Image: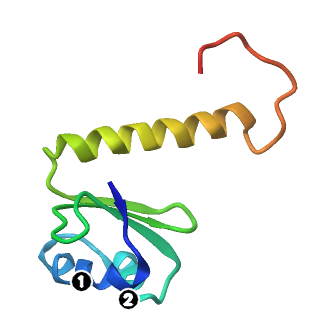
Amino acid sequence: MFKLSKDKYSILLNFLPTLPFNTLMARSIACGHADGTIYVDNAENPQTYYIVHSYGMSWLIGEADNDAFNNWLREYFQGKLLTKKRTNGCKPTHETGTNL
């Protein structure tokens, strides 16, 4: 999967108007008015997007049956959640014995 460079964020602007829900924050990120990151399945012709605002709001839009992207996203979430679970924002004081 690809983390788009900010100069390519505008590629999302053609897709957002086709969605049946509020995309104001996603548009703000794509236009550079709000801080965020855009991940795509294909840098030149994306079909699946994961858009993350810096405060945590996110959108997963596009092709739902994109197995490669879905697998990457699952691994991404597991890595993020496990890191947060292990530290919970603090230094761990002991191990629980669970397989994280």
Q: Quadrant of the C terminus?
A: top right
- The image quarter containing residue 18 is bottom left
Mark 1 — residue? 13
In primary-sequence order, the first of circles 1 and 2 is 1
- Helix, strand or loop at mark 2: helix
The structure residue drawn at horizontal position 36% and vertical position 45%, both measured from the top left corner, is: 73
Question: Between 54 and 1, which is closer to the camera in this rendering?
Answer: 1
Q: Which mark is residue 31?
A: 2
* Amino acid at the residue labelled 2: Cys
In the drawing, does residue 49 fall left or right of residue 81?
left
Neighbourhood count class around disc 1 (C-alpha, 10 Å): few under 14, some 14–19, many 20 upward: some
Q: Amino acid at mark 1?
A: Leu
Which residue occupies 59% across, 33% down? 82
Q: Which residue is farthest front?
A: 44
- From the top left corner, tell me how far across and down residue 87 is, in percent: 74, 36
Give the quarter of the figure containing the N terminus.
bottom left
Q: Say what secondary structure mark 1 lies in.
A: helix
Q: Residues within 10 Å of mark 2 (few under 14, many from 20)?
A: some
Q: Which residue is depicted at the point 78% across and 17% down?
A: 95
Mark 1–mark 2 distance (CA, rounded to whole Å): 8 Å
- Residue name at image x 30 percent, y 38 percent: 71
